[in-house]
Amino acid sequence: MEIWTEKYRPRVLGEVVGQDEIVSRLKAFVKNRNMPHLLFAGPAGTGKTTCAICIAAELLGEHWNTNFTELNASDERGINTVRTKVKDFARTKSIGDVPFKIILLDEADALTREAQQALRRTMEKYTHTCRFILDCNYSSKIIGPIQSRATIFRFKPLKEKDMLQYLRRIAKSEKIDFDSAALKAIYAVSEGDCRQAVNLLQSAAASGKVTSDAIYKVASMARPSEILEIVKTAVNGDIISARSKIVDIMLEYGLSAIDTIKQVQKSVWDLKIPDSAKVYLLDKIAEYEFRVVEGSDPYLQIEAMLAQFYKVGDGKKP
């Protein structure tokens, strides 16, 4: 695909990584120059909006910019948006030799139910002139009538292999000095969110060589090995030392109590304790997270949480 204007770079489905099955199905729509209404669902940073723009660019060709519009449903989420902007664009004839117009409703799960009810009739009435692409994080928040009118594509977080390949390509293109451990740290922090991964790489590269230490500092996260060591210290009975270390880490990395609790929760699975003890700890960790969210003193709750690990190590609990 060529660049049609200097303002926009070419967008092609082949550039999307980690969603091979979805991309192959979308390419079939491009080949046939036809597609149904589409619903993209999945976590953030997995390529939903990118795929929507790519298929619009490839289907509509040089006229794509005049026959494609994008609305962020979280900003314009009321019924009036559907009745005015969406309806006015959908009912007008497309410009140039293209089969139909395309409307992308980003974050469609933010639309009110009244707006969704109005949208379902618009989708049905103007099918001959317009196709809709809705993307959302939670398809359960989209009403049934809209889901039944659209083909649903479920995006998944990127696998480590795909993420590392993509990050290496960016690093090579931008001449970024990095080590392999840093890229693995980016994947561990981003958990398959490609957008967050690229932002972490860019932020860490601004200060020089990209290392795992730089990544954790940019992400304001402690190393998993550090958290695991603290938890083991508490289980082994040295609660004073565990408390001192976790406070030091919170101050060093700028961690909030919620961030710390979430990292402690992940470390539970790596402890060599009975499964019944892990279940007990997870239940208690969830309780302390709730207390912090409700406004309890964060450091007091962190200490109380460590006390539960001490109980497990002392054999008084499962």
Image (tube, grey):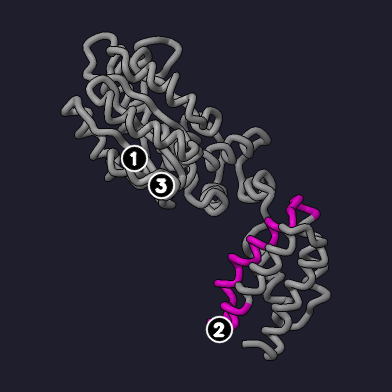
Separation of disc 1 and disc 2 at Cα? 43 Å
In the rendered image, the vertical position of residue 163 relative to residue 120, given as above or below: below
- If you read the primary sequence from the N terminus, does the residue marked by circle 1 or circle 2 appear first? 1
Amino acid type, mark 3: Ser
Q: Work out whether residue 89 can be spotted.
A: yes
Span shown in magenta: 251-280
Label at residue 146: 1
Q: Position of residue 98 (x, y in %)?
A: 23, 16
In the rendered image, the vertical position of residue 145 relative to residue 264, given as above or below: above
Mark 1 vs mark 3: give the one in front: 1
Q: Which residue is at a point 49% across and 38% down the rendered structure image?
A: 112
Q: Work out whether residue 167 can be spotted.
A: no
Q: Which residue is at a point 33% across and 16% down the rendered structure image?
A: 67
In screen coordinates, is 134 left or right of 31?
right
Q: Is residue 259 magenta?
A: yes
Q: Which residue is at a point 55% across and 34% down the rendered structure image?
A: 176
Label at residue 139: 3
Q: Residues within 10 Å of mark 2 (few under 14, many from 20)?
A: few
Camera-nearest residue between 302 and 122? 122
Separation of disc 1 and disc 3 at Cα? 10 Å
In the rendered image, the vertical position of residue 52 relative to residue 245, given as above or below: above
**Outermost residue toward the left?**
32
- If you read the primary sequence from the N terminus, does the residue marked by circle 1 or circle 3 appear first? 3
Amino acid type, mark 1: Ile
Q: Which residue is mark 2?
A: 276
Q: Position of residue 149 (x, y in %)?
A: 28, 39
Q: Position of residue 198 (x, y in %)?
A: 53, 38
- SS at circle 2: helix
Q: Residues within 10 Å of mark 1 (few under 14, many from 20)?
A: many
Q: Position of residue 225 (x, y in %)?
A: 63, 64
Quarter-wise, where is residue 57 in the image? top left
Tell me the quadrant of the picture where the C terminus can be found. Answer: bottom right
